[in-house]
Amino acid sequence: MRKLYFTTLLLLFCLILQGQNRQISISAKNKPVKDVLAEIQQNSGYRILYNDEVVPDELRVTVNAENTAVKTILDAMLKNTGLTYIMQTDELIIIAKKEERTMQNALLGRITNEAGEPVPFANIVLVAANNTADFRQGAVSDIQGYYHLTNLKPGEYQLQVSFIGYKTEHSELSLSPNSQEPVVRDFVLKTDTQILEELVVKGQQPALKVENGRLIYHIPSLLKNKSLTNAYDALKEIPGVTEQDGRLTLIGANGMTVLLNGKKSSMTDGQLTALLKSVPVSRVEDIEIMYSAPPQYNIKGAAINIILKEEGESPDKWQGEIAVEYAQKSDAGGNGKASLFYPGKKTTVDLLYAYKHRPVFSKEELSATHTLENQAHLIRQTSKGKNAHNEHTTRMGVSHTFDNKDRVDASYTGIFDRYGSDRSAITDISSQRIDTQTGSDGTYTLHNIQGDYAARFGLTAGGDYTYYHNQTDYHLLNIPQDVTATEREKITSSSKQTIHRTFLYAHQKHSITKRWQLNYGVNYSLAHTQNRSDGKKNDLEYEEASFDTRQNETIWNVFTSVSGVFSDKLSAEASLSAEFYKATNESKEEKSTIWNDKAFFPSFNISYTPASRHIFQFSLSSDKNYPSYWSLNPSVYHFSAYGVIYGNLYLRPQRNYNAGITYIYKQKYVFRVFMDYTPDYFIQLPYQSREKLQQEFTEQNFDFKRQTGLLAVIPFTIGKRISSRFVTNGLYWREKDDTFFDIPFNRTTLLGYFQLNSDIDLSSKPDIKMNISGYYSTPNAIQGIYDLGASGDLSAGLTWTFDRERAKLILNAGDILNTRTPSAKIDYMGQKSRLDAFQDNRQISLSFIYRFGGFKEKEKKEIDTSRFGGL
């Protein structure tokens, strides 16, 4: 027995000795001592404890060691710094000032939550054990959750640790007069769900405040008890923000733009999603919700502005990301991306290359009854085929900050795409069968150069130039089954589009008083577009499908806005923009005016907070959308023996006005009533010709489209691991057009929309999370003379984060039931058809992302390509 006892003591001694002689390798040149201590902690397994007041931020050290004991490294690096260390236990090292080496009657520790995350700014109160009203000493935990009390008198105490949103923890404490070592006492705070529901943190910023007509969510307070890791997941926690088909939307708003520090991003929806998922949630300071964005953001309508924290001193080293994805639909596709970012002290550089291969299969079944000269013709058509894109994207950006804090940004973006299609159709027109074969092959190239300057006195100015070229060759072959091969119909076309577009802006900001701000500015856009199509039918010139046009467009926009705070409960923002737009068309030496007009766009937000539990906001926004350049041409595109698409020289821009009242209860339950009114709304609709057996598709302006709705967003949790959000939306929908061919319409309907999104924390170690989302839209929607069927979606994803959050493996299943695409039926004033479309939406994908050097994707300004293409 004695031998066993002695052996155990010897083993424990050896383990302690081994722990005190842990060896690591480290190399640091003139780095902050806090960063070096963090690296030692990460590599050695020790927990290193210190107070921010003891270790100053500006203190730097140089150390270079290879397989050296931690004790030896600390001796060398802390020499001549006025600091020393105490190896309190085999797992704990305490950094202290040399004059406090004995740490007599000191109390140290760390405050964390149940997820192991630090709780900063927690209150630590030391009171007498026999009289809790007898306060002796107090402290507040630092950003890492550490606290430090010194110079305590011997005695019996009770230690109380509290923070809003958590239950208060108590601990008895006895300090001996002969103690030469500090007392270490850690605390794990448990969530107090009753207090957490209020979402207002005393001693910190509130989780939600209303300012200048904006809803501002303070993310550190809002998400302090949630195990989220990135900005994208943080956005989904904002009431009213939801995810649908992999895209973020602001419910009750007609469209929405995501801003980063007040700037539009420069990417597609998919690229923007990747960016937000790469930004750590710790970098997000605030998220601003604007149902009516001020015009100085160069956007109209609703916006979400993500405010990122200023980063500390740059590490002066390259950072990067490599990402690949394999996606399986009917055919296999995928994409890859490589990014590099150099965050210098004054100059940053970012580089990007991305590739996408996107094959898409689709199938359509059309049944129609076409009445021509009082005779009904039965039409049956089945078409199917594949489209494929191979897209390359390159980017280089440079940003430089001057000593006076002025900043200049410049970037180049290039997009190069080669695409093609191969389709077939079988059309039966009154028992006469026609087989159709179509195909296309094309390329498009885009070059964009941007430059921006931000001055310290509130002036921002800049611009961009975009060159776009698109060329497509197309062929169609109709083969009737009851005639000879010589009577086949063959149509070919070669189409080209070249666009030169320049955009310039200058904005100025002034602070009138501490509570009021004035903004004003001007934007200018100039576009020159060349459009050409050479069509042939049976190898002869097809004049109807041939044209050569040149369009010139100028748009001036001037605005002014004012925002401010009347009181702690009432704030407002109002703006007015005036837009002057003119476009001309030249064809065969003839010049005509497409439009020459002006428009005014008012917007305002008024926010009223009578109490912390109740917030009201009234908003009005206005906007205008222009047709694509190609739509304004006399184009003719046959896609089957029965269907043809026509351009529209007389298409007008559409305007949009959105007004709504939002009520937020307990700062998380959202209720909104709204109306969205769009005069001159345009969309492509079919019409069965009265002159021939042909269904003609044309983009046309309606008199208006109007939607009035009521929505509710109800977040809830199930246990500690499931966070869900239920959204319901009811719409009264009206569309009216008195000039739609010979069948004017004035149609109304009621529509319901329901969505449920759940994030599930399956495991923290390993870090595995799951998302399940779905929605259902009732079969009452309309689109002109179309009646749309029900649609829905069920998607799921699994994410494994590992290698200290540098690597991610993501498995996604999208549109599992393949129900996103609704059926489209027409039965109106002699027009009768039904289209059942199979879109290649169901997908399984596997993605791998690896980041190095602390990479966070660079913010980029958006390149607007919404009016390009269409060939």
Image: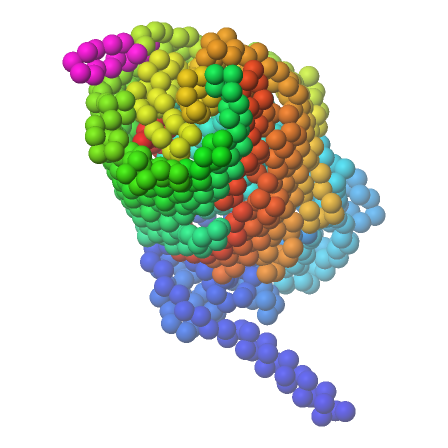
> Vertically, is 582 above or below 409?
above
Q: In x, y percent, where is residue 204? A: 61, 34
Which residue is at 53% across, 73% downward? 20
Residue that protrudes farthest toward the right in the picture: 130
Report whether residue 800 is seen.
yes
Q: In x, y percent, where is residue 534? A: 22, 29
Position of residue 199 in the picture relative to residue 37 (left or right): right
Position of residue 400 in the picture relative to residue 388 (left or right): left
Position of residue 435 in the picture relative to residue 585 (left or right): right
Task: Name the image quarter holding the N terminus.
Answer: bottom right
Task: Name the image quarter holding the C terminus.
Answer: top left
Q: In x, y percent, where is residue 325? A: 44, 53
> Vertically, is 826 above or below 197?
above
Q: Is residue 526 magenta?
A: no
Depth order, front residue of 433/812: 433
Position of residue 562 in the picture relative to residue 115 (left or right): left
Q: Is residue 591 magenta?
A: yes
Depth order, front residue of 776/631: 631
Report whether residue 515 is seen.
no
Depth order, front residue of 470/48: 470
Q: How is the image coloured?
A: rainbow
Which residue is at 41% across, 69% downward? 25
Which residue is at 76% across, 53% downward? 171
Which residue is at 42% across, 30% downward? 642
> Vertically, is 135 above or below 108?
above
Q: In x, y percent, where is residue 612? A: 69, 24
Magenta-tinted stretch: 580-594
Q: Quadrant of residue 343?
A: top left
